[in-house]
Image (cartoon, rainbow, N blue to C red):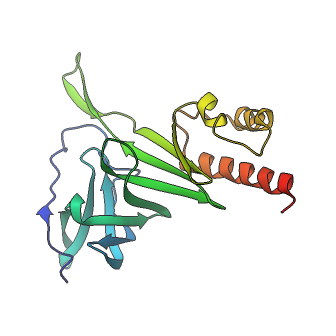
Amino acid sequence: MNLVNGILYYDKYKNVLSHPFYSVEEFLPGSAVISGIRYEDVQINYDIYSQYLVLQYPVVEGSSYSIIIPPEHTDAFDFDRNYFKKLTLDDRGPLFYQLIEVNGLICYIHWEKKKATRSYQFTEFFMEPEQRYFLDYHGKLSHFSNRRNFVSLISGVPKKEIIRYIRKKGIQLSDATPEQLEDLLQFISSGIHSTTGN
């Protein structure tokens, strides 16, 4: 299979606390679109420190290799019910974004991790993920980083209701989870439909 071409990925972070991946360290079943070709039932993970899609494949029973799929050839991938696509949304150029879509409303999340050192221990560790958010609201794409600028992007639903919902659910829009954003978009979508009578 021509998918098994890439740079060998090895664990160069074994002495770094935590891991560089999106959610869990284990490889999970998913699919990937590489140079326009979709591959199903592959074991993948997303290294958000180095911004690589990593593929794991068996070589002999009980043994496997992991390779980096070059980012320039990686169009999209999904695993564990999370969908990512390579997009250019600002002047930083093409990056991988997680897509959260509800009834035509789309939130894009770019994930990153950084390394740091505990000076008193001289120990390296991966910090908590950082997210950068964009909202596509009826075809208009905007960046948001807090409750105020998120709410300012919404029309068709009373802003006080949105603020009340955000507070009730304890959502911090500087580091909201995909699940929280999906619920929020669902709430906004329901409000739009009830206001328009659809």
Can you name the residue that lies furthest to the bottom here?
1
Total numbered circles: 0
Q: Is residue 71 left or right of residue 154?
A: left
Vertical comparison of 24 with 162: above or below: below
Q: Is residue 164 left or right of residue 12?
A: right
Relative depth, front residue between 82 and 72: 72
The structure residue drawn at horizontal position 18% and vertical position 39%, both measured from the top left corner, is: 15
Quadrant in the picture for the N terminus: bottom left
User: Residue 50 appears at what percent x and percent y?
Assistant: 24, 47
Relative depth, front residue between 181 and 57: 181
The structure residue drawn at horizontal position 21% and vertical position 27%, both measured from the top left corner, is: 123
User: Residue 153 appears at what percent x and percent y?
Assistant: 63, 39
Q: Quadrant of residue 73?
A: bottom left
Q: Is residue 178 left or right of residue 71?
A: right
Quadrant in the picture for the C terminus: bottom right
Relative depth, front residue between 195 and 12: 195
Vertical comparison of 148 with 165: above or below: above
